[in-house]
Image (cartoon, rainbow, N blue to C red):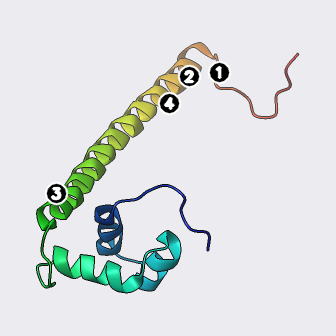
Amino acid sequence: MEKKKTQISKEEIVAEYLAGGISFRQLESKYGKDYRRIHEWVLAYQGKGRSPKNITLVHNKVNSLSTDVKQLQSELRKAQLHNKLLEALLDIGHEKYGIDLRKKTGAKRS
C-alpha cells in the first residue's frame, strides 16, 4: 500500500481505528506509523495506557467527527426530500400539461 503523503494527526488515526474495520497493522501500512505506537495512542485515549496525555483532545476529535457525520446525514435527508419534491413536480407537470421536462438519455446535442 502507498503511504499517505499528507500529515495526519494521531487523533485522526485513533478515530479511524475506533470507528472499526481496520487493524493496527493496516493503519501502520496506510500511514507509515509503527503499529505499536498506534496501539499506545488508542490505549491512552481509552485511559488504559502509560501516558494518558492528550486524551481529551482525541476524545473531542472523535466527538467532533460524530457530530459532523450527524450533520451531514441530516443535510443528505433534506436533499433527498428536495429531490423527491422536484420529481413529483415534474410528474405533475407531465400529467397535467403533457410536457416532459426530463432530459432524455442518449439525446444528441445539435
| In the depicted structure, whether residue 79 falls above or below residue 67 | above
Do callouts 1 and 4 mark residues in contact (Cβ within 8 Å)?
Answer: no
Q: Residues within 10 Å of mark 2 (few under 14, many from 20)?
A: few
Q: Where is mark 3, residue-wise? A: 60
- CA distance for labels 1 and 3: 51 Å
Which element type, helix, strand or loop, lies under badge 3?
Answer: helix
Secondary structure type for disc 2 = helix
From the image, state whether disc 2 or disc 1 is nearer to you: 1
Q: Mark 4 or mark 3, which is nearer the start of the sequence?
A: 3
Q: Which residue is mark 4?
A: 87
Q: Which residue is mark 2?
A: 95
Q: Is residue 63 left or right of residue 75?
A: left
The amino acid type found where label 1 is placed reads Asp
Q: Position of residue 1 (x, y in %)?
A: 61, 74
Mark-to-mark CA distance, 3 and 4: 40 Å
Along the line of sight, the residue nearer the viewer: 24 or 104: 24
